[in-house]
Amino acid sequence: MNQSAADSREDLLERGRAAYDARVWSEAYECLAQGHRTGRLAAADLDRLAVAAHLVGRDSDADEYAAHSFRAWLDDDDLRRAARRAAWLGLQLLLRGEGVRSSAWFARAADLVEELGDQADPERGFLLIPVGLDQLDGAAEDAFATFAEVAQLGRRHGEPDLVAIGELGQGQADVVLGRVRQAMGRLDEAMLAVTSGEVSTEAAGIVYCAVIGECEAAFDLVRARQWTSALDHWCAAQPGLVPFRGICLVHRAHLMQLIGEWADAVDEADHACSLLGGHPAAGEAYYRLGELHRLRGRYADAERCFREAGRWLTDPQPGLALLRLAQGRRAEAESAIRQALDAQPSGLGRARLLPAYVRIMLESGEPAAARRAATDLTGVATRVGVPLLTALAAEVEGACALSDGDATSALAHLRMAWRAWRELGAPYESARARLQMARCHLLIGDVGSAELELDAAGWVFEQLDAGPDLEQVRRLSSRSDPAGPLTGREVEVLRLVATGTTNRAIAAELFVSEKTVARHLSNIFVKLDVRSRAAATAYAYQHDLV
């Protein structure tokens, strides 16, 4: 290489290092990768290249560059850095579900740590991480002790990554053990290290995603919202960042679903599916998308998404069981939810399945099993004390009381659930509670109150495009009969069409978009088996709807 080319290459590498320090990952990767193609990089630059490749979503390249870095550190006789690079590569592979390759790299790191003895105490902390992760499944107390040692090693040797991951692991163990309040404190401590910029980007992404997942697992919606917003800003500040942005989209989609922004949630989940590709987190993305399709009555799309989710998730539940119930396959729904529940003998993972279990058991004619599950969920909600669990417990207690014919008790529970869902800002769940309240009113003969609840619930379901729930409203409402198969909002649209009102004017009158009006009109044509506005108008006059 002549002097001019060498100078040019060094300039390229300097640009790559500067972009790396500025966390402009796409530029860092392009510059360092181009430098690597024109000659051998130093071990430190190979380290940077491996990290940048991982953060722009090029996992196979990242693995290759990490392996080169490992060998370069060995050539430099820097066994500690070689051990650390091997341990980080093992952890990345483990988090992607590649257990065999992960074990091989951890074994290489362990050999070097053993050779170094006490000199490699910080690296020993990284080797404890896979041990703790394995213990979380069935030996949570041991996992807590292991991650406590990780954090202790981090503090002793000034390693913020180890401290943050150690606090995270202890929090995860606390969640498994049902110590939710303690868990949230430890997770907040791990996040504090991230938001204050103390840890590396690799560790920050791991902590962010795991903490938000644990908040959702612990039904702490407030924390999940706050940390998802923080993750969104963190990702936006780092051009080219891919893996954590995809996971961020999954969490955002879930929260959008809860606050009633279903159309945006579908877009976010769909984008996450594309962005994550073969990453294990794609399972959660497809599961979320499947849930949204199920709630909208698009069962074929939901089936496809749950099948995709099943490539990464052991069992996409409770969504798949609820889909089977909606498809009229009750025996399959019951079998699926029982198996899922049997696999979760205790803890918050079981609480996540219990509402679906209660619903399926009630519809399968097994009220005693539903009652036992409702009592189980109420116990968890009382012990944990988070609003979302309180709402779910009140809802299933109300459903069981309604099934027993005790409308008074059912109403008391359902009103409690409705208030809790409203405070959480969850419109769909609020409307579901009101739909159940309408059933209570009908049971005691209070048709007027039932219609009020049905009107309120139906309006929400219509805004969300929750077709199956809208159909339940229509079947229960005594006022829906003159309109035949039409919903209340479709009747409103038809009345305005019959008076010659344009779609734009209808949209302004009903405070919706023209696109929504067009969708309603299309549904009206299908349901009434007509092909024109004139034919729909004739139907309206024939049935005294104008």
Image (tube, rainbow, N blue to C red):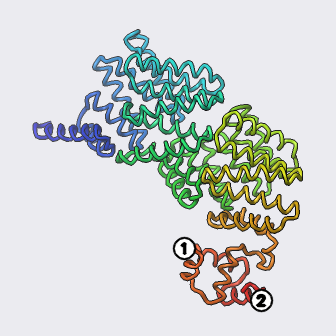
| Residue at 58%, 22% in the rendered image | 143
> What's the residue type where badge 2 is placed?
Gln
Q: Nearer the viewer, residue 408 or 5?
A: 408
Q: For residue 144, say whether it is visible.
A: yes
> Badge 2 local density, few (<14 within 10 Å), some, or many (20+)?
few
Which residue was labeled with disc 2? 542
Give the numbered dot on residue 406: none
| Residue at 75%, 57% in the rendered image | 326
Quarter of the figure with residue 495: bottom right
Count of picture labels: 2
Q: For residue 332, say whether it is visible.
A: no
Residue 88 percent across, percent down from the top left: 42, 28
Q: Seen in the image, is 283 located left or right of residue 357?
A: left
> Badge 1 local density, few (<14 within 10 Å), some, or many (20+)?
some
The earlier-in-sequence mark between 2 and 1 is 1
The quarter of the rendered structure image containing the N terminus is top left
Residue 489 percent across, percent down from the top left: 67, 74
Q: Tell me the element at label 2.
A: helix
Residue 362 percent across, percent down from the top left: 83, 49
Quarter of the figure with residue 349: top right
Q: Nearer the viewer, residue 441 or 1?
A: 441
Quarter of the figure with residue 134: top right
| Residue at 34%, 21% in the rendered image | 81
